[in-house]
Image: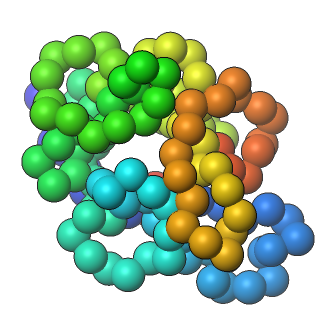
């Protein structure tokens, strides 16, 4: 069995925001939003060998078509694929997306995967 990997999941800013380091400092939290990276435990995620994303003892899942944290199970709705370009694709074939303005905490949504959409690209540090 492969070891799990712990990372912060950060979004990539749109091209017009790339001049500001703050735009690169937005992290997915286990509280269910994307906001400024603060280095708190809720920003750290474990990627399991089966493709589940866990934080704070819960798994990121798709519940009624929306991303949500829930108790971890073997459900396919808690398994994610990380693509070469940085998308997190759920079992429903849609991409995890940050939704809302960059200057405020963003909510999460499942949306059709687009080509290099900044709100759908997630960076995993090496």
Q: What residue is rendered at 39% in x and 52% in y?
A: 32
Residue 65 visible here: yes
Looking at the picture, does residue 79 appear above or below residue 82?
above
Q: What residue is rendered at 64% in x and 50% in y?
A: 99
Looking at the picture, does residue 60 appear above or below residue 34?
above
- The quadrant where residue 81 appears: top left
> x, y percentage for residue 17?
80, 74
Q: Quadrant of the N terminus?
A: top left
> x, y percentage for residue 28?
44, 58
User: Which residue is nearer to you in this view: 9 or 29?
Assistant: 29
> x, y percentage for residue 29?
36, 60
Q: What residue is rendered at 71% in x and 64% in y?
A: 101
Residue 79 visible here: no
Looking at the picture, does residue 108 appear above or below residue 48?
below
Specify whether 56 is left or right of 66: left
Specify whether 8 is left or right of 115: left
Specify whether 105 is left or right of 5: right
């Amino acid at each position: 069995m492969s070891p799990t990997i712990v990372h912060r999941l950060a979004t990539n800013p749109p091209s017009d925001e790339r001049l500001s380091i703050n735009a690169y400092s937005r992290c997915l939290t286990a509280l269910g939003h994307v906001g400024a990276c603060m280095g708190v435990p809720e920003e750290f995620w474990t990627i399991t060998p089966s493709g589940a994303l866990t934080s704070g003892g819960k798994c990121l899942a798709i519940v009624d078509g929306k991303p949500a944290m829930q108790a971890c199970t073997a459900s396919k709705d808690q398994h994610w694929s990380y693509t070469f370009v940085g998308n997190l694709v759920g079992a429903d074939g849609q991409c995890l997306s940050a939704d809302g303005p960059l200057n405020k905490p963003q909510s999460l949504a499942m949306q059709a995967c687009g080509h290099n959409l900044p709100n759908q690209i997630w960076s995993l540090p090496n």
